[in-house]
Amino acid sequence: MTSELLTIELNVANHPGVMSHITGLFSRRGFNLEGILCGRTGDGEKSIIFLLVNDGEQLEQIVHQLEKLYDVESLIVHKKFNPEAFTEIRSSLGIA
Amino acid sequence: MKYSGAEITIKLLERQGITTIAGIPGGANLPLYHALSGSSINHILSRHEQGAGFIAQGIARSTGKTAVCFATSGPGVVNLLTAIADAKLDSIPVVAITGQVASSFIGTDAFQEIDTYGLSLPITKHNFLVRSAEELLTVIPEAFRIAGSGRPGPVVIDIPKDVQNERIEISSWPLPGMPDAIEPIDDSVIRTAAQMINDAQRPLFYIGGGVIVSEASSLLREIIHEFSIPVVSTLNGLGTIADDDPLYFGMLGMHGARAANELVDSCDLLIALGVRFDDRATGKVSEFAPDAAIVHIDIDKSEFNKIKKNHCSVRGNVAEALSLLKDLLVKQQRSGWDAVVKAGESKLIAAQTKEGNVLHPSNVIRFVSSIAPGNTIITTDVGQHQMWVAQHYPFKHPRTLLTSGGLGTMGFGLPSAIGAALAHPDRTVICFSGDGSILMNIQELATVADYQLNVKVLLFNNGHLGLVRQQQELFYNKTYMAVKFIRNPEFAVIAAGFGIRSVTISDPSGVTKALPELLLQNGPALINVIIPHEYNVLPMVPPGAANRDTIGD
């Protein structure tokens, strides 16, 4: 499974519309989004978002379109990551 | 000194150099209009917010500068959305400033409340919901910077009424927002591109709106002649190269010139300049330029490899790229290609002198072009007339054709003509339309009459939704469904009702006598040309087919 998935780390401005911009991009361009983790960083001015996506033909477009978003300040593609990051949340809530 | 959010907004727009705003007032933008009453900015009261949006587009498309429209919350915003989406698809810099219910009412389903931010998100380059008067000082210049930078596009600024009314102390004003400086182009990439062009036996330029945006028209004209490279254009690239240029082969794609599509078919290098490989241009993508390597030059890197894999991606401003290329290109002998180009040229001429009937739109359009002043601005609606204009009007200059290419919005023509006329009061503006399209924003004839603008509406009236009828004839077994109007209004009476001169033309003598009489008078006019509904736009590539599989002509 890990060979097909990768995560994109986004550093974004923290305001109420940011998540809509990112998820809206995925829905309107027909990109698949397998998971999202998001949280504030530092003094709350910024957020960090991890997107779980398929490593496929769409990746170049996904990256380029994300980089165009006004609130996205930097983007890193992590081919190596621990997918449990996305499932641990469930277990930490006692539902997995 | 203390200023309200509304006053700050207007002040910043003035400092931004905005002289005209189209819009409609309502409950949630009353403070903005109150502030506007004390401003030097000229307000154009349209009759529908979509009209206001397209008026702003007409200004932006004809000048290249960011233009502004206003709407109130709720229905005002929803009415505006079509024009915003249209601006997004054709990369037009527009800043739309919308009133919103007061912050404390947001989310309560208040009167005329709508989620402007959510609705505008997928159809804007960026959007803002302003949370304080203080924020306006950064948001407004920033909106102009975003709209005009790189690949232009629309920006929505949603301002709640309480923010418009909030008063804050201002000691100094921010600088106006300006487009970002042009980024340098990667030297090794441009060298690769130049090498590919120098090595090509059959190079071809495929150009689009990005060439006009970057004001690269005259530079491109120099380059194609110096290095003998032919050109085909998209709908929104028309005017970049003069129609009578021997190296210019017209529009490619679904309703493109056969010669243009044939050149694309046979080239071995396609130099894609400020284009996005739209399906109306490419036809079946796998069969588009099948023998060609592709050099794609564009400011927006997300266009690279989006539709078709290319072999060299040059990210940057098209004018900048061309000026670098000019020094790197080498004159080549390409006798085989020159012969093909020459043959295509004569085919193009043959294709242009076919229709006998004076009332055929292609002939009317060419006749109009022969009597209209050279700097006339043409706008179109969407449908058969639009394609006939694209095929037959001999455009000579950039920004003389304003047309809805990406979204294909019927109703675009009249209000965008208003915008063009406001921005160019010394020029004639002709809106070619159809009896289907014109009724979609007919109310803006009132705006034309208000300001006695030099806008001529030339209506090709066939009693049908002609382009849909054509598709039903060709691809749906002549089963006509919902394409013939049960009855059509008397357009002469409509024009008279708005106080606009008009004439209805149904015979050839009308074209040669009444049409020029009205067209060459100053002020608004509506020319209603009755045409047979059987005329089809040809050539045509069936949807989904390869561009070489052309029907007709």
Image (cartoon, rainbow, N blue to C red):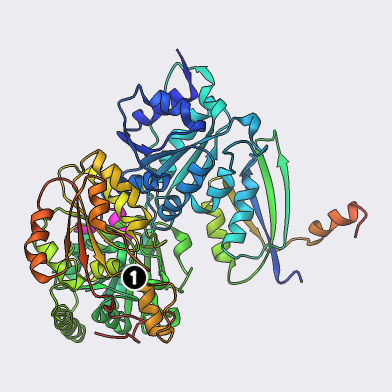
Tell which of B350 and B125 is nearer to you: B350
Tell me which corner region of the image, top left, top right, bottom left or bottom right, holds residue B391: bottom left
Outermost residue on the right side: it is: A94
Q: Return the residue nearer the eye: B93 or B353.
A: B353
Residue B118: in magenta span: no
Location of residue B346 with respect to B517 vertically, above or below: below
**Span of residues in magenta:** B209-218
Disc 1 crowd rating (10 Å Cα; few below 14, some 14-19, many 20+) is many
User: Which residue in the structure is indicated by mark 1?
Assistant: B464
Q: Is residue A32 left or right of residue B435?
A: right
- Where is residue B540? Give x, y as percent: 32, 80
B440 or B390: nearer the viewer: B440
**Image quarter hosting the N terminus of chain B:** top left
Total labels: the figure holds 1
Give percent across and percent down for residue B367. Answer: 11, 66
Quick one: B208 or B43, which is closer to the camera?
Answer: B43
- Which residue appears at 73% of the width and 44% of the height? A39
Residue type at tag 1: His
The image shows residue A56, relative to residue B335, as above or below, that is: above
Query: Taking B255 as reference, is B108 left or right?
Result: right
Can residue B61 be seen here?
no
The answer for which chain carries disc 1 is: B
The kind of secondary structure element at disc 1 is: loop
Residue at 51% from the left image edge and 44% from the top image edge? B75
